[in-house]
Amino acid sequence: MVSPAVRAAIDEEIAKMPEKRGALLAALRLVQEERGHLCAETIQEVAEIFELHPAEVMEVVRFYNHFHERPQGRHQVNVCTSLSCALRGGRGLLRQIQAHLGIRAGQTTEDGRISLGHEECLGACGNAPMLRIDDAYHLDLDWLRTQQLLDGLE
Ligand code: FES
């Protein structure tokens, strides 16, 4: 169950919106902050709050990279693989990271340290290749710098 504190925060977000559904993203963010991820049961619960079908909520969860259906590692590493980054080695960088961590994009290291993903353009094309670690952008990367960043994550 969503905690009373999170439920109250969701109700506050709903009150700001002309339509209840307008608060769905904020609600999902609040629930994920509390639980770490959005499992089917949680999605059902959110759907009930918003009087939506669970499939509608699931569509939103799957559309946005920052929502997760499974437990995640302590750090999110997301490599941009869109055109500018790809042309400057972004996809190769992702392959090197996969080999270094022993996981593929979409997976989490066994020690729960890192969840790896790739995403579409993050608007930093002028500094390609780049990746995002949690909320921080890291730009103009090469493998040495990337390895230092990864190995420095607790
Ligand atoms: S293509 Fe990677 S930031 Fe735009």
Image (cartoon, rainbow, N blue to C red):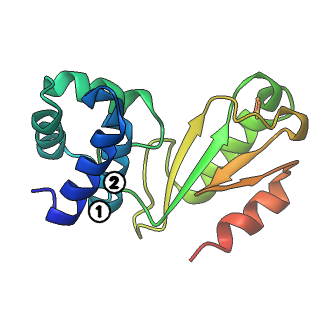
Relative image position of residue 107 (x, y in whole percent): 43, 48
SS at mark 1?
helix
Relative image position of residue 65 (x, y in whole percent): 48, 37
Disc 2 vs disc 1: Cβ atoms closer than 8 Å? yes
Disc 2 crowd rating (10 Å Cα; few below 14, some 14-19, many 20+) is some
Q: Amino acid at mark 2?
A: Leu
- Identify residue for label 2: 30
- Which mark, by number, is residue 56? none
SS at mark 2?
helix
The picture quadrant where one finds residue 149 is: bottom right
Relative image position of residue 146 (x, y in whole percent): 76, 58
Q: Is residue 97 left or right of residue 41?
A: right
Q: Is residue 77 above or below residue 60?
A: below
Q: Look at 31% across and 24% down and name the residue there.
A: 59
Q: Is mark 2 within 8 Å of ligand 1?
A: no
Q: Amino acid at mark 1?
A: Glu
- Which mark, by number, is residue 34? 1
Q: Is residue 49 above or below residue 102?
A: above
The picture quadrant where one finds residue 124 is: top right
**Number of marks present in the image shown:** 2
Disc 1 crowd rating (10 Å Cα; few below 14, some 14-19, many 20+) is some
Q: Is residue 29 above or below residue 88?
A: below
* Quarter of the image where the C terminus is located: bottom right
Q: Look at 35% across and 33% down and name the residue there.
A: 17
In front of the other: 77 or 35 = 35
Relative image position of residue 57 (x, y in whole percent): 25, 29
Q: Look at 29% across and 41% down and name the residue there.
A: 15
Asked if one can make out residue 68 in the rendered structure from this viewpoint, the answer is no
Q: Is residue 132 left or right of residue 101?
A: right
Alpha carbon distance from label 2 to label 1: 6 Å
The picture quadrant where one finds residue 48 is: top left
